[in-house]
Amino acid sequence: MSSLPHTGIDLTPTQQRILRELVTRYRQCEAPVKGESVAEGVDRNAGTIRNQMQSLKALQLVEGIPGPHGGYKPTSTAYEALSLQDVGEPAAVPLYRDGERIEEAVVGEIHLTSVLHPEDCRAEIQLQGLVGAFHEGEDIVVGPTPLSELRIDGVIEGIDDVNNTLVVVVDSMRAPADPT
């Protein structure tokens, strides 16, 4: 188990994945999300999701909405626990795989993990949405970012599906970026 930032709440990696998936799907439709939809996104059984949602409700991270149009929605504590902001639409940071833009992928954060060693530079690209569509060895381009116009070209070295993060070996970085 790991303690989530700002809250001190201990969640299993499975609970973290479920909560992130719920937040992602809720942001996409801005309506309660069915457990079956979350189950599909994290490749789990719907019954398992219902059980996990009960635990997340007890921790006040999830609210259950009854009725035919019901489902689950994240609470403000869930956003805080995942270090996400519950405000408006995020700025769009394009993500390309093998030259094709991936519309469903929203870049949440970019962390440069080894800037001091340019010959071994890596970036962690945290997505709001599942990283399951990506595979190690794929070429990706992130950016340009809205403010600094940073563009990162690299190859996926690893995938952290608990934190929705792609670990990328950086081939090049530039700001402002040239248009794609």
Image (spheres, helix red, strand yellow):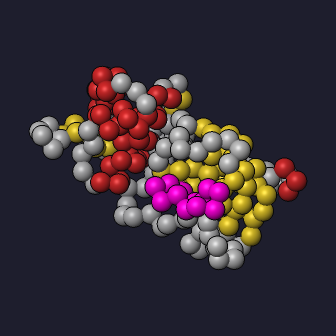
Residue that sits furthest to the left in the current view: 67
**Rendering quarter of residue 44:** top left
Q: Residue 37 magenta-drawn?
A: no
State whether residue 59 is above or below residue 76. Answer: above
Say which residue appears at 72% left-offset and 60% top-offset: 153
Which segment did they paint magenta? Answer: 95-107
Say which residue appears at 30% left-offset and 54% top-offset: 29
Q: Residue 102 magenta-drawn?
A: yes
Nearest to the observer: residue 130 or residue 19 = 130
* Residue 136 visible in the shown view: yes
Nearest to the observer: residue 117 or residue 59 = 117
Whole-percent x, y for residue 122 in the image: 75, 50
> Total of numbered circles in the picture?
0
Say which residue appears at 64% left-offset and 73% top-offset: 180
**Residue 62 in the figure: left or right of residue 113:** left
**Residue 24 in the figure: left or right of residue 114:** left
* Residue 106 visible in the shown view: no
State whether residue 171 is above or below residue 7. Answer: below
**Residue 49 in the figure: left or right of residue 126:** left
Nearest to the observer: residue 54 or residue 160 = 160
**Rendering quarter of residue 165:** top right
State whether residue 93 is above or below residue 123. Answer: below
Whole-percent x, y for residue 112 in the image: 71, 54
Whole-percent x, y for residue 1 in the image: 52, 24
Say which residue appears at 68% left-offset and 41% top-offset: 136
